[in-house]
Image (cartoon, coloured by chain):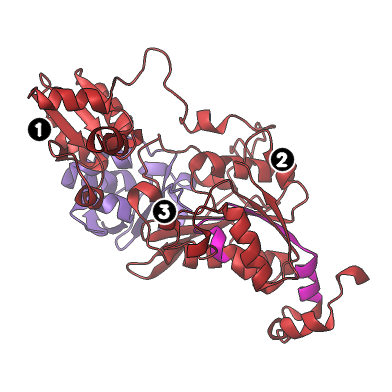
Amino acid sequence: MSNEIGLTKQEVHRYSRHLLLPEVGVEGQQKLKAASVLLVGAGGLGSPIALYLAAAGVGHLGIVDFDVVDESNLQRQVLHGTRDVGRPKLDSARARIADVNPHVDVTTYETRLTSSNALQILRGYDIVIDGTDNFATRYLTNDACVLLGIPNVYGSIFRFEGQVSVFATRTGPCYRCLFRQPPPPGLVPSCAEGGVLGVLPGTIGTLQATEAIKLLLGIGQPLIGRLLLYDALSLRFRTVNLRKDPNCPACGTHEIRELIDYDQFCGVTTEAPGDEIPEIAPAELAVRLERGDDLDLIDVRELNEWQIARIDAARLVPLATLPTAFSSIDPERDVIVHCKSGGRSANAVRQLRAAGFRRVWNLTGGIERWNREVNAS
Amino acid sequence: MSVQVHLPAVLSRLTDGRRTLDLDGNTVGEIVNEASTRYPGLAPRLKDEQGEPYAFVTYYLNDDDIRIRDGFRTSVQDGDELTIVPAIAGG
């Protein structure tokens, strides 16, 4: 340990409760000060992670995000405040971290993590923490960590449940050992669609920060080869065993030698030719409803979204229950499906077409675009 | 064999809100079939068209991934717990 990372008198005072712990002590605190941790995402999970790692004295934090603070973020993203609405998240993150601990260096990357920039951004960090909100970035982060040999502290949340693990260590499994492939788009709603308990990312992000600190200090038993499952409603923690899959294309066979197109891998890209989703624009639907066309307008969002706002002529069939509602759909009638912005309903159209329904259309842009273009006019 | 099945919240909408199910069967596959019979909406979320587990839903019999055993053909004991863990991506 070089003198450059020695602790100043002020730092000794600041970190005194750490220094009292034999498992940390001066040497451990110096390790934290010398450490670099990259946070992918400065949202729900990234908030407690950034705050606690900064407070703990991790010397260098990198943060990747390209979003601006929205008022609907504030229910859980405690890194940002009301005055930050409309501001880039990286700006408010930097200011908040500087206030929590001015001894922390912050590097910000205002970009989406992509296959072309990920290795460059991640390289050199001791630990990467995955706090993203989509499958494509999770697989990208995982593969980049495996390729670079950087531990990936994984956390993921949905509604009242969370998952935590430590991937991509030298001997342990990776994210692909747990989930070889992502679900098809639209099957698992995002938090923006499905909702999330505001305090949930606080719990899960804090566990991720804990794991990162344990890894940096080399203490305890990190969640390597184990997956922690948390259920806030039943307040139940369960840990299950993960094994490194010898056939895993990332960490097992190493057939993934470079980063791939993760949008394509996750099916986010547009449909293949011949498999286009038939679309109907909100204005056209408005005309058809106005003239009394006989059609079945199906809203595949969740009940709570329906309760907030709905299109009058629609009936509710949440996407997950769609297969059970096939019998209620008349194949001779025109069926128009909508959701919030068009993603889940595209999935519904695909399911309906696969089930043999031919007269099915997706409402382009969902109820959001309907509200902008039809309700507002 | 009676097995307690723990479902994630995302699937409990298909089981009238039930998060745990007590089901009978001799293998994990039989338990999954029993769940699918009782709640038909669950079927396409638990197994693919060939009746096999998806790559984005992991099954744990007690603490162990059934993939390191015999997948859906893994035999179960009375009192075992089956935990279904789907991929989630929120953050």
Give the mark toward the camera: 3 or 2: 2
Q: Position of residue B72 (x, y in %)?
A: 36, 43
> Dot 3 lies on which element?
strand
Chain of the residue under label 1: A
> Dot 2 lies on which element?
helix
Depth check, front residue: B84 or A361: A361
Q: Which residue is mark 1?
A: A328
What amino acid type should be assigned to the residue bearing mark 1? Answer: Ser
Q: Which residue is mark 3?
A: B60
Q: Which residue is mark 2?
A: A119
> Dot 1 lies on which element?
helix
The reply to whether callout 1 and callout 3 are in contact (CB within 8 Å) is: no
- The segment highlighted magenta reads A27-48
For the residues beneath circles 1 and 2, the answer to whether they share a chain is yes
Say above or below: A365 vs A305: above
Q: Position of residue B1 (x, y in %)?
A: 26, 56
Q: Callout 2: few (<14), some (14-19), or many (20+) C-alpha neighbours within 10 Å?
A: many
Q: Left or right: A316 with respect to A99? A: left
Please say whether residue B42 is one of the residues in the magenta stretch: no
Q: Is any atom of residue B16 visible in this view?
A: yes
What amino acid type should be assigned to the residue bearing mark 2? Answer: Leu
Please say whether residue A40 is one of the residues in the magenta stretch: yes
Which sits earlier in the primary sequence, circle 1 or circle 2?
A: 2
Chain of the residue under label 3: B
Depth check, front residue: A96 or A196: A96
Q: Left or right: B12 with respect to A31? A: left
Q: Position of residue A51 (x, y in %)?
A: 60, 68
* Image hue for chain B: purple
Q: Quadrant of the C terminus of chain A?
A: top left
